[in-house]
Amino acid sequence: MSFKAKRHKGTGGNQMPIEALRCKECGTEYDLDARYVCEQCFGPLEVAYDFTRLDAAETRRRIQAGSAGIWRYADFLPFDGGPPATRGSLEPGLTPLVRADRLAERLGVREVWVKNDAANPTHSFKDRVVAVALAKARELGFETVACASTGNLANSVAAHAAALGLESYVFVPADLEEQKLLATGVYGTRLVGVNGSYDDVNRLCTQLCETRPWAFVNVNLRPYYAEGSKTLAYEIAEQLGWQLPDRVVCPIASGSLFTKIGRGFGEWLELGLLDGELPAFNGAQAAGCSPVAEAFAEGRNVCRPQRPDTIAKSLAIGDPADGPYAVELAQKTGGSVESVTDDEIRAGIRLLAETTGIFTETAGGVTTAVLAKLAGAGAIDSDERVVVVITGEGLKTLDAVREGHSVEEIEPTLASFEAIEGVPEITTV
C-alpha cells in the first residue's frame, strides 16, 4: 500500500517531534513514506509525534517569530528539520477570526467568532492540507501530484502544483459546479471529469495510486495531508489570545477536518501551550448526504454509505473515511452532528452574509444553518464562546443563491427611483 519515490529522507537522527506513521486501530508503526493503510488490520495511518522533546515556552516564542502562515507551526507538522523548502510559495494560513456580534445577536448567543478560511490563496481551507501534502511530496521525491476532489481540493492542488513546478492531475465528478472547474483548469492541470459520484472518483484514484508513481494527496499522502487541518486549531487558539473556545461548529465531509481540529487543540493541551479541556464539537452535514449525522443520531460508530443528493457538493462524501472518528469526537466532547436541508443551507448563506459581510459557499451555509439550529434548540449556553469554521468562498457556488435576490429596474430619473415600493420618502426639516 506504499509507493517508493525517487528519494526518501529517513528518520535517523531526527531531532523533530515526528516519529512514524501509526495505525489508528492497532498501533502498528511504519516508516515515513507514501502509505496510507495498515498492512496488519487495514486501519488508517496517521502521523505520530513525540512532543516531550519540545519546551512550551520556547515553542511559543518560535511560533510568534515564525512566518505569517502555517509554517509557523512547523514543530507540529510532518517534516524533518523545520519548515519545508516550499515556505513562501502560496503559503496559506493566518486567515481572519472575525467577531460576529450581529450574527450572535440574531441567534441569541453571547459570543460568536467566524474563522473565515475562504481568505486563503485559492479561497478555501484546502490550501492548508495541500501545502503540507505537496511539501511532503517534494521531500519524498515525487514529481507528479494528483487528487480526487469535489472542487475546492482540485483548485488548490492545481494552483500549488503550478507554483512549485509539479505536474498535476485532478479527478472530479463530471457534474461539478462550473465555477470550480474553471478555477481549476486555469492553472494548466490535467482536469479529468469522471461520470459518477465523489466516491466513484476516489475509488478510481485509489486504483491509480497502486499503478502510477504519483503523489495522490488524499490517498497515499493522506496521513500527511490531513495534518494541515490542525493548523486551523492552532490559529484559532492563538487568535483568541492562547485560549480555547467553548464550542466549535465545523462542516463534515470525510470527517478529517473535524477530527484534526480536535487533535490540534489536544496537542497544544498536551504540551501545555493551552489550559482547559477540548471544546464541544458540533459537526454539520447536508441532509442529502448525512451518513455521520445519522450514525450519531442512532448512537452507532459505523457510517452507512449514502448516495449524495444535495447542493452542498463539497461535503457530498457518502462513505466518509473518518466518519467513525468524527462521531467519537462529538460524543466525547458533549457535542453533536446535525444535518440541514438545502433550503436551510441557502438561508444559512444569506444569514452569514447579511450579518457579517462574509459570502460563503454551500459548505459554509451548512455550518451556519447548523449553528442557527443549535441556537434555536437552546443547545448553546448563554455564556459560551462559539467558533464557526467557514471553509470556502461563495463565488464558487453562485447557483445556490441565484434566486435569492431581485434587481429593481428603473428609468434614470428621481421619480422612477422614488416610485419603488419601500423606498422612504424625502422629509424636510
Image: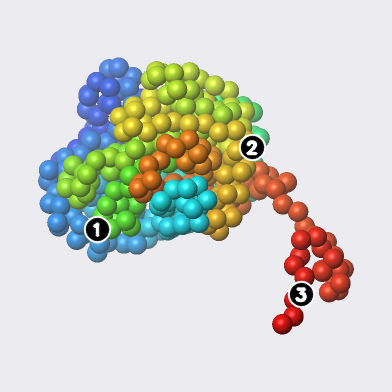
Q: Nearer the viewer, residue 274 or 80?
A: 274
238 left or right of 62?
A: right
- Which amino acid type is marked by label 1? Ile
Q: Which residue is rendered at x = 47% and y = 48% of the image?
A: 108
How many angstroms separate mark 3 from mark 2 (CA)? Answer: 37 Å
State which mark lies toward you, 3 or 2.
Answer: 3
Q: Is residue 142 above or below residue 425?
A: above
Whole-percent x and y of residue 80?
23, 47
Q: Are marks 2 and 1 in contact (CB under 8 Å)?
A: no
Earlier sequence position, callout 2 versus callout 1: 1
Q: Nearer the viewer, residue 221 or 164?
A: 221
Query: Which label belongs to residue 343?
Result: 2
Q: Quadrant of residue 425?
A: bottom right
State which mark lies toward you, 1 or 3.
Answer: 3
Earlier sequence position, callout 3 versus callout 2: 2
Pointer 1 local density, CA inside 10 Å: few below 14, some 14–19, many at least 20: some
Whole-percent x and y of residue 208?
48, 28
Q: Which residue is rendered at x = 75% and y = 67% of the image?
A: 424
Query: Which label belongs to residue 63?
Result: 1
Q: Secondary structure at mark 3?
A: loop
285 left or right of 192?
A: left
The residue that disc 3 covers is 426
Q: Nearer the viewer, residue 263 or 421?
A: 421
State which mark lies toward you, 2 or 1.
Answer: 2
How many angstroms separate mark 1 from mark 3 (CA)? Answer: 56 Å
